[in-house]
Image: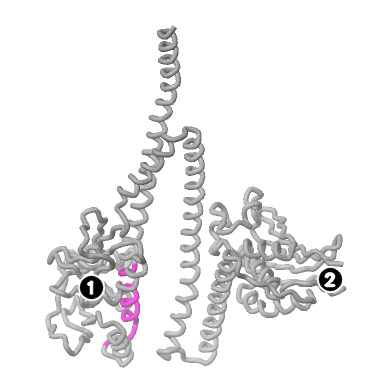
Amino acid sequence: MRRFIFRITIFLIVIISLPISFLVIRQLSDLTQNEKIVKGVFEKQIETILYSLNQSSENIITLWISRIDIPIEYNSVQQDKIVNFLFENNQTIHKVEFYDLHQHKTLFKRQRSDSTDSITEIPDKQKIEDLRRFLDEGYQRVESKKSGEFTILNFISKNRGKDVLGIIKIHTKTFIEQNLGPNIQQVAQQEFNIKVVDINENLDLYSVGIVDKNFADSHSQSSWYLPGIEFSIQLRSATIDSLVRERSKRENYIFAGVLLIVFLGILFIIISIRKEILLSEMKSEFVSNVSHEIRTPLALISLYAETLLLKRVKTEEKETEYLSVIQLESNRLSEMVTRILSFSKMEKNKRTYHCSEIDLNDLIEEVIYSYSPHLKAMNVEYKLDLEQKNPIFSADREAVNECLINLLDNAVKYGRDSGKMVTVRTLLKNEKILIEVEDNGIGIAKNHQRHIFEKFYRVTKGNLATKAKGSGLGLNIVKQIMEYHRGDVKVKSILGEGSCFSLIFPVKK
């Protein structure tokens, strides 16, 4: 009997342990794969940070070049003012020079009073030909060279002929401290140790965090424009491998405890990671879209403001036109910032509403009046079809105003290329007040209509993708405002024909 019980026990143990062992091995394999994904995400994030530091360097240098490489006379008062302004606001720059490669003479040269540089260093012919070739292809490349504690930046002048070489001499350490330092501090925060190293001299030029810590496990990337300079970064709390091992240990403990709990836990983790990755991608795309959308009005404002400051405008009409553009683009920036702040308050449940009796027709006419300059600038015709009874109901005036602006903005943004038309109407229907904003634009496909009110959601295929430059917040803000008013927002749209958004407010008896 005992032998039989022993055999049965062994048999049951084998029967149970085999599938469990197979499942354990399979799950451990899956966990290992997941750990590689997590490690890859960490490494990708670090690579992105290093890339952003190099991108910042490029943006700064490109801005300097764009300010000095303009079609004006050499040694003119304007040229002196521009270069002196650049020197006063950037202690990094020690010399600015334009050199005629054909006649082999200096056309313009300014340097700091404390600078003893008197020699013009010209790149070899091959590098000059490379710079010319890139310029012919529409890209102004910058060739950099290390010169002691300085860096020489060479470029072919875009606005003064292809035989003119532009030269900017910068102090490498000062550039890193003053120009890149704030950006390094921002990306480091409390999570990363970052240091900038001169690998030729084995010298630390700048650091954030604990610099004497072993950087053997750090990630490094060479600077694009500073030869011999390298950016290094690592996590402050732990290494990536230790974080991955800790996660593996935690998951293994859970799996060893209860197989069912581990199975459900892994399923929950996979779903959560998937949601977080999707949300992270949407937030990343949101930041990218907002950055691009903000960059355009900022560039226009900077361009026209600089033109006015340099007094290049010859007529009052042009001056008025430039000021109008600055005002219009400033309003655009203000609207974008207001939208983001509004969404932030809603996310934190800190937005307050103040309801009062509203004459809907008066409110719509005020919104259209304030928005009409934008409609005119975008060549959009509009039509008002308002209920004659002047619907009056209780709501937050500012919130309803924001809903209308968001819907009008979308109607204009996604309108057809020519003959844009926007209709705003009010209706009383089944004891409900409706505000409809209708356009004759490109429309929305049915499979996207149920998602457009989700935060950060933007269509990434078709005509909407090419026209979409927004943040993906406007319709979500409208939905949250309507939910507060116990109302609803609906959309009817036919692809290629247009869309009609309806704000539905209940009538309180």
From the top left corner, tell me how far across and down residue 285 is, in percent. 48, 59
Quadrant of residue 149 in the image? bottom left
**In this rendering, the label closer to the viewer, 1 or 2:** 2
**Magenta segment boundaries in residue numbering:** 56-74
Tell me which amino acid carries mark 1: Leu
Tell me which amino acid carries mark 2: Glu
- Residue 144 part of the magenta segment: no
- Residue 67 part of the magenta segment: yes
Q: Residue at x 61, y 63 (%)?
A: 414
Instruction: Name the residue nearer the viewer: 488 or 293.
Output: 488
Label 1 vs label 2: CA separation? 66 Å
- The image shows residue 465, relative to residue 104, as above or below, that is above
From the top left corner, tell me how far across and down residue 240 is, in percent. 31, 51
* SS label for mark 1: strand
Reading the image, the residue beneath label 1 is 153
Quadrant of residue 92 in the image? bottom left
- The image shows residue 288, relative to residue 307, as above or below, that is above
